[in-house]
Image (cartoon, rainbow, N blue to C red):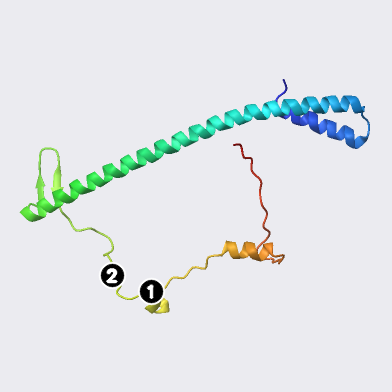
Amino acid sequence: MANIYELTNEFMDLQEMIESGEYDEDILSDTLESIDYEIELKAEGYAKVIKNIESDISGIDAEIKRLQDKKASYKASCDKLKANLKEAMMITGKTKFKTDLFSFNIAKNGGKLPLAIYCEDEELEDEFVITKRIADKEAIRKYLDSGNESDLFGYCERGTSLRIK
């Protein structure tokens, strides 16, 4: 049995024969039926492999989510333990000490101080505002779909996809 590439090439060869007009109707018909049958068998085999891979992907996605949830739980536990230890150190006044294995210290954070702004963004002066223009792709798509043309946007083209149910 030929592979999908060979079948595709055979089909293209038949198409060239038809276009050239040099072919026998019976041979063409038999060959076309044979290629169609083999392509259907190949397609079925491909679909089985695709479904198995998609199933594996779903399983991997579920495992990733499980591990991410576990990571988030560990992080929350770690943050809670740190907060409890810091609070105990602050209450007892032991903000700096050493044990055999670790050193403990409550220090001020470096870098920029947190900033509290007491007005709404609309009330800020222009010099304190950052604006960014973002293209409304849905509006552009509707504009182009309605038959309008523009040198700014290029073109809008729908792709195709294979669906196996």
The answer to whether residue 21 is above or below residue 126 is above
Task: Please name the amino acid that badge 2 sits on.
Answer: Ala
Which residue occupies the foreground of this view, 53 or 118? 53
Residue that lies at the very extreme toward the front in this rendered image = 165
Quadrant, the N terminus: top right
SS for tag 1? helix
Q: Is residue 104 visible to the viewer in this orientation of the structure?
A: yes
Figure check: 148 above or below 12: below
| Location of residue 68 (image quadrant) | top left
Is disc 1 surrounded by few (<14), some (14 to 19) or many (20+) residues within 10 Å? few
Q: Is residue 66 left or right of residue 41?
A: left
Between 59 and 8, the residue placed more toward the observer is 59
Residue 118 at x, y percent in the picture: 29, 74
Q: Residue furthest left?
A: 92
Counting from the top left corner in percent of width and height, residue 46 is at: 63, 29
Q: Nearer the viewer, residue 140 or 37?
A: 37
Q: Position of residue 134 (x, y in %)?
A: 53, 65
Judged left or right of residue 94, residue 161 is right
Say what amino acid the circle numbered 1 marks: Asp
Query: Dot 2 corresponds to which residue?
Result: 116
What is the x, y in percent for residue 49? 58, 28
Residue 121 circle label: 1
Q: At 84% across and 34% down in the image, what residue appears?
A: 15
Inter-mark Cα distance, 2 to 1: 12 Å
For residue 148, side relative to residue 96 (left or right): right
Q: Earlier in the sequence, mark 2 or mark 1?
A: 2
